[in-house]
Amino acid sequence: MGGDQRRAIPREAEVVVIGAGVTGCSVAYQLALRGKQVLVLEQRGICSGASGRNGGLTGAGSALHAAAGRAVSALTRENLRMLQEDLARELDDDFSLCLSGSLDIATTEEQYAHLVESVRLQQEQGMDVELLDPQEVRELVPVVSEGILGARLSRDAGHLWPFQLVHALANGARHYGARFVTYTPVTRILQRGGAVEGVETPAGAIATGTVVVAANAWTPQLLPDLPPGALVPARGQILVTQPVAPVLPHPFGTNFDKEYGRQTPTGQILCGGYRRLDENEGLGLYEERVTPPVLGGIARCLTTLFPGLGPLRVVRAWAGIMGFTADGLPLIGPYGEAKGLYVAAGFNGTGFSWAAATGKALAQLIVQGISAFDLTPFDPNRFARGGVAWENPFTAGERNNPRGVVSGA
Ligand SMILES: Cc1cc2nc3c(=O)[nH]c(=O)nc-3n(C[C@H](O)[C@H](O)[C@H](O)COP(=O)(O)OP(=O)(O)OC[C@H]3O[C@@H](n4cnc5c(N)ncnc54)[C@H](O)[C@@H]3O)c2cc1C
């Protein structure tokens, strides 16, 4: 690091946020909005982690969480409301939010049975979801396969431009005085007498009484006492086609959300999934590298689910690292015994359904000492208390097929 940048690094801050993905930028924005003096430290560039490498799908609720359904629903619904209302109004940039509704398409009897049950439960909880038969799906998406068994239409869902949202949040945070220092990793969180006292970086220490770890997949490196397996890196891959005329009006998921995609406003089709064809199903990997078996699987998914697309050229592919948790729920709240240490990480494959509301919930907690949301199921200390058993419903492999994991939210 050059001397100028070294000198530019502040020596103290009221709050240090580690990580400038969508979560860190949202936390920084909400804290700065509430008058806190915030410093964000990022090991690479803003939005260089999973936040800059994802599909851009967003929505409220989850059909894959049996426990914690209501808390998941409350936070993700607030997230969607904030994207539509507060952030659309407060932030300077248009992050291309399009609430078109999304389709969860069943191609096997098992997937269809899961859809039927989850639609019933979600409707009971007041969610705007509907089960469509194959003909109804074809009316919405004429290119879809003749072989599908049906789909769930979730109206509280859609897609956005992730990069633009993250930078809008960072700019919003800067507007209220937050500072961002990039290419500066935090190497250690410093504690003394049961409280946080700062962070260590290659450019020296920074004093602070409050640290928020928003480092997602890299969280275990900063919290060495997090039980092994509680939060693990998970590599995901995406391919993008050449632009075509509008054919996919709704983002889609299939096979318990393991495969997913959307058409961007500029016509390109993004499709991801098939982690089960990666080394160790993508789990434990930090290398942002695409692999032919996974890309082949994704391409097959696209062409078999939507044969009417015809031949399409793939123009780009990339990989990103997510933070998967043992129970599929994020870690949001105070961490361990040290006063002033908080975590917001482990958003699995759905961070854009959480980040805005998570920033607000955590800022309320830090500034007012209490959050308006029920964060109990997301307690970062739950694994230290109860142990780690891998039951992640998003896990790609068939060994973790979420049979029976059905909930309304
Ligand atoms: C291929 C793929 C597809 C996806 N599709 C979707 C989707 O369609 N919809 C959806 O909602 N989600 C999707 N996700 C998941 C989503 O991208 C994540 O849940 C979300 O971006 C998490 O945001 P974050 O800010 O918590 O983490 P990240 O964006 O990973 O940010 C963490 C940041 O912390 C930084 N950092 C780490 N360690 C340190 C350190 N020691 N010091 C300083 N900085 C540090 C990293 O460099 C990184 O920038 C997908 C992810 C991938 C990879």
Image (cartoon, rainbow, N blue to C red):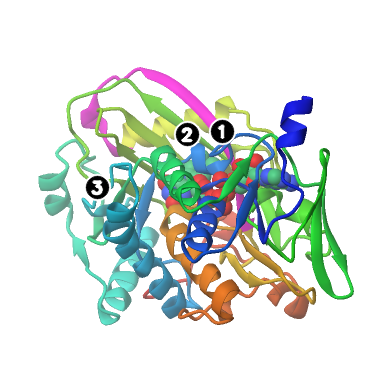
Mark 2 lies on residue: 238
- Residue found 56% across the figure and 29% down from its top: 293
Locate residue 125 relative to residue 25 in the image: left or right. Answer: left
- Relative side of 310 to 209, left or right: left
Look at label 3 and name its amino acid.
Cys
Tell which circle, 1 or 2, labels the residue nearer the N-terminal end: 2
- 308 in the magenta segment: yes
Q: Is residue 238 above or below residue 377?
A: above
For the residues labelled 2 and 3, say whether their Cβ atoms are less than 8 Å apart: no
Asked whether disc 1 touches disc 2, contact meaning CB atoms under 8 Å apart, the reply is: yes
Q: Residue 30 versus residue 228: which sits nearer the camera? A: 30
State the residue at coordinates (65%, 37%).
182
Gap between marks 1 and 2 measured at Cα? 6 Å
- Which dot marks residue 319? 1
Q: Could you tell me how many numbered marks the image carries? A: 3
- Name the residue beneath numbered marker 3: 98
Q: The disc labelled 1 sits on which kind of residue?
A: Ala
Disc 2/disc 3 C-alpha distance (Å):
20 Å
The first of marks 2 and 3 along the sequence is 3
Callout 2: CB less than 8 Å from ligand 1: yes
State yes or no: Cβ of the residue under disc 1 lies below 8 Å from any atom of ligand 1: yes
Residue 78: x %, y % from top left: 36, 69
Residue 371, x across and y down, in percent? 51, 79
On screen, residue 199 above or below 318: below
Give the quarter of the image for residue 223: bottom right
What span is colored magenta in the figure? 305-324
Image coordinates for residue 238, horizontal then vertical, percent? 47, 34
Asked if the stretch drawn in magenta spans residue 309, the answer is yes
User: Callout 2, which amino acid?
Assistant: Ile
